[in-house]
Amino acid sequence: MKTIQEQGYTFHEWLKPEQIAKDVKQVAARISADYADKEPLFVVVLNGAFVFAADLIRALKDVRCEITFIRVSSYWGMSTTGQLEFIVPLQQVVDNRDVIIIEDIVDSGLTIHQLKAHMRAQGATSVRVASMLFKPGKLEYEDAKPDYIGHELTDEFVIGYGLDFDGFVRNLPSIYKVDNE
Ligand code: IMP
């Protein structure tokens, strides 16, 4: 089994590029079927989702669409609901648009929960979520369950294919899981 070392931790290869390609194709086929007669606006959540987004939008079939990017950061300050800071704010009007948020991974769901509320407040007709990975056991916000999921996992930490470990390893073509020994 292929393993790598990063910052003193061992990670083993979990999803190879061939499997990731299958997952992306499956998600793209579902979105293509659901949005054939619509003109969705994809909102890519930076930084992690850029790799998945690049593959996903090119795998769509006959979907006329637009793509925009945002960068957010979640803070848990005094409030239990947390607060979303827009580091790169939404630059596209979402009013009357069918929005599909593209994420790398949904964990507690806080980011997506807040983003969906934000898009709705801005007048989006519909808001759905496509995420390469989903940790169902960690979900704290029911409305953040992705509509389109590449692959599910339990609560392990994963890296690669856009996912980072302190800013590094986003460029790995496979997805690796941390070894918990
Ligand atoms: P949430 O708001 O708790 O759902 O967190 C989502 C964000 O946490 C993702 O966009 C990632 O940036 C980060 N994240 C959660 N789990 C992992 C992981 O296993 N590896 C790398 N980043 C993760």
Image (cartoon, helix red, strand yellow):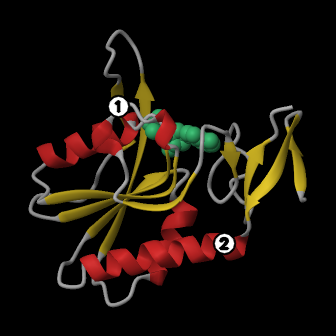
Which amino acid lies under the numbered mark 2 shown in the image of this protein?
Answer: Gln
Kindly report which numbered mark, 2 or 1, lies closer to the viewer in this rendering.
Answer: 2
The disc, 2 or 1, on the residue closer to the chain's N-terminal end is 2
Q: Dividing the image into four equal quarters, which quarter contains ligand 1?
A: top right
Left or right of 30? Residue 119 is left
Pick whichever, 94 or 55, lies toward us. Answer: 55
Distance between mark 2 and mark 1 Cα atoms:
33 Å
Residue at 40%, 38% (x, y): give it. 109
Which amino acid lies under the numbered mark 1 shown in the image of this protein?
Answer: Leu
Left or right of 75? Residue 104 is right
Residue at 63%, 50% (x, y): give it. 163
Where disc 1 sits, the SS reads strand
Left or right of 123? Residue 152 is right
**Alpha-carbon neighbours of circle 1 within 10 Å: few (<14), some, or many (≥20)?**
some
In the rendered view, tell whether residue 14 sits above or below residue 120.
below
* Residue 64 percent coordinates (x, y): 27, 84
**Alpha-carbon neighbours of circle 2 within 10 Å: few (<14), some, or many (≥20)?**
some
Marking on residue 38? none
Residue at 35%, 22% (x, y): give it. 82
Tell me the residue that label 2 is attached to: 19
In the rendered view, tell whether residue 113 sits above or below residue 79.
below
Q: Quadrant of the C terminus?
A: top right
Q: Quadrant of the N terminus?
A: bottom right
Tell me the residue that label 1 is attached to: 84
* Residue 34 percent coordinates (x, y): 26, 76
The number of callouts visible is 2
* Residue 170 percent coordinates (x, y): 68, 54
Q: Can see residue 85?
A: yes
Where disc 2 sits, the SS reads helix
Residue at 11%, 60% (x, y): give it. 125
The furthest residue to the top: 78
Occupied quadrant, residue 157: top right
